């Protein structure tokens, strides 16, 4: 009996190992040049192991505090003081759940979300999904490109169209960094995130916000739902926070660490520490977004200032009639530095996301440098054309941000629904499939976000036309 029991146990263990070991057989690895390139201690202490896993979360987090978030967060504070802090909190919790699911998908299956989606769809549907997702990448990149171009103009007085063209060189920097190792990219992005955090922390401290008002802002206010303009701005904050390309990115870069998929304990450990890294970095993004809203509330609430553009914010920080005695050119320049840091860090991750989507959906076979250049050109060309047509009219160029949010809203369900489906499927995920509460919460989020984004699309189009 003992021998039979051991045999059954051995068979069960072997089957489990086969499940994890054969997932990626014959398939191209996601971001193959860095996949599994970072070694992690097998038996190290908690802090040593966590340090080895820290990094990918920073690349994901920058997408949650990119220039596309800035206008909505600061406008939220300027219009409704601290009330919408609760919206930022809810958005951040949603992001943490979705990114944890994306990381778990990549670690368990050895495939990213694009690869998994393409594998389970027809060729025609795969091409359709690639087009939708590629438009989302382009839309995401628009905010970063415009933000970086404006920051370059504000800092160095370079024409906007030239500043936008300069951002196309980012791809060359990324090519160099990839040769130096993925940890170098993580370190640079983390440094840029730290710059953004400390700039806005400094500016918020100078603005002397109401601590009591901030704490009350995290208590949900019924007016958010009943007040139409407040609801619209809240949806803008959610839409600018939860973006589809981050789910593809997270499912891929979670695989940059060494993973022994023949060992369930090691897979579980990888998931635990990767999710910890993601939550730590997304907490930083949450703090940055809160700081942006608090800055808007402390400096601009009740001033009737026009804060619809980055240039308006830049000049307002140097206008004593608007922000009072703390106004100074230093505040304006720090804002521009943070904007440039945000744009540059986000374009690195946007280019990586573009590569992941191209390889996953259409199995593009071409040199890596050509892939990244093509991805960058697809993103920057529409902005350059628009900038050339409306040369000298920065308001029109920044108006592209509104259009980009519509594309993001359209693409979001096409990323969230497959993610929930795959991570809830025990045939795909085995024992690492979503627990019941995670699955139902994720479906609720997916349905609510889809409905809200459809409403946001209709409302935005009505304003535009």
Image: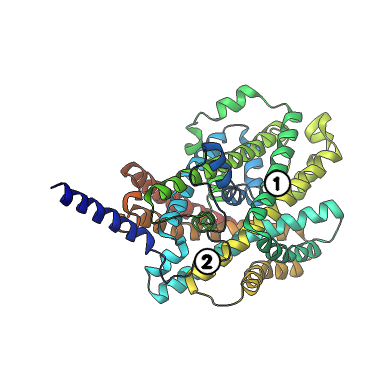
Label of residue 265 in the image? none
- Quarter occupied by residue 380: bottom right
Label of residue 191 in the image? 1
Placement of 172 over or under 449, stated as above or below:
below
Residue 127 in view of the camera: yes
Q: How is the image coloured?
A: rainbow
Residue 228 in view of the camera: no
Q: Earlier in the sequence, mark 2 or mark 1?
A: 1
What SS does tag 1 mark? Answer: helix
Report which residue position mark 2 lands on: 357
Considering depth in this image, is 443 or 98 the residue closer to the camera? Answer: 98
What SS does tag 2 mark? Answer: helix
Q: Quadrant of the C terminus?
A: bottom right
- Which residue reaches farthest top? 212
Q: Residues within 10 Å of mark 2 (few under 14, many from 20)?
A: many
Tell me: 407 left or right of 430. Answer: right
């Amino acid at each position: 009996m003992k021998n039979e029991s051991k045999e059954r146990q051995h068979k069960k263990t072997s089957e489990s190992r086969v499940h994890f070991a054969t997932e990626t057989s014959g398939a191209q690895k996601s971001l193959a040049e860095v996949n599994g390139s970072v070694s992690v201690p097998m038996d190290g202490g908690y802090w040593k192991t966590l340090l080895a896993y820290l990094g990918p979360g920073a690349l994901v987090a920058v997408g949650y505090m990119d220039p596309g978030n800035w206008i909505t967060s600061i406008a939220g504070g300027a219009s409704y003081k601290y009330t919408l802090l609760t919206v930022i909190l809810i958005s951040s919790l949603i992001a943490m759940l979705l990114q944890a699911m994306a990381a778990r998908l990549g670690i368990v299956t050895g495939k990213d979300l694009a690869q998994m989606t393409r594998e389970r769809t027809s060729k025609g549907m795969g091409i359709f999904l690639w087009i939708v997702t590629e438009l989302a990448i382009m839309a995401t990149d628009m905010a970063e490109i415009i933000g970086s171009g404006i920051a370059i103009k504000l800092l160095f007085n370079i024409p906007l169209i030239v500043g936008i063209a300069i951002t196309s060189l980012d791809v060359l920097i990324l090519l160099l960094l990839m040769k130096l190792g993925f940890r170098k990219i993580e370190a640079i992005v983390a440094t840029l995130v730290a710059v953004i955090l400390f700039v806005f922390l400094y500016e918020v401290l100078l603005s002397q916000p109401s601590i009591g008002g901030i704490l009350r802002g995290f208590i949900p206010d019924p007016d958010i739902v009943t007040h139409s303009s407040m609801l619209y701005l809240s949806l803008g904050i959610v839409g600018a926070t939860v973006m589809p390309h981050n789910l593809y990115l997270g499912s891929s870069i979670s695989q940059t660490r060494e993973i022994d998929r023949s060992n369930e304990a090691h897979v579980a450990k990888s998931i635990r520490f990767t999710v910890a890294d993601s939550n730590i970095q997304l907490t930083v993004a949450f703090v940055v977004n809160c700081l942006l809203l608090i800055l808007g509330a402390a400096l601009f609430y009740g001033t009737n200032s026009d804060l619809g553009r980055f240039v308006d914010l830049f000049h307002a920080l140097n206008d004593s009639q608007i922000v009072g005695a703390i106004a100074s050119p230093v505040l304006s320049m720090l804002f521009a530095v943070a904007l440039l840091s945000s744009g540059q860090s986000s374009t690195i991750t946007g280019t990586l996301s573009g590569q992941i989507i191209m390889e996953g959906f259409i199995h593009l076979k071409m040199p890596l440098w050509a892939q990244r250049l093509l991805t960058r050109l697809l993103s920057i060309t529409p902005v350059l054309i628009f900038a050339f047509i409306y040369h000298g009219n920065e308001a029109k160029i920044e108006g592209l941000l509104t259009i980009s949010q519509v594309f993001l809203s359209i693409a979001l369900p096409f990323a969230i629904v497959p993610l929930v489906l795959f991570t809830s499927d025990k045939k795909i995920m085995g024992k690492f499939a979503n627990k019941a509460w995670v699955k139902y919460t994720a479906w609720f989020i997916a349905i609510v976000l889809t409905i809200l984004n459809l409403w946001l699309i209709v409302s935005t189009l009505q304003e535009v036309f």
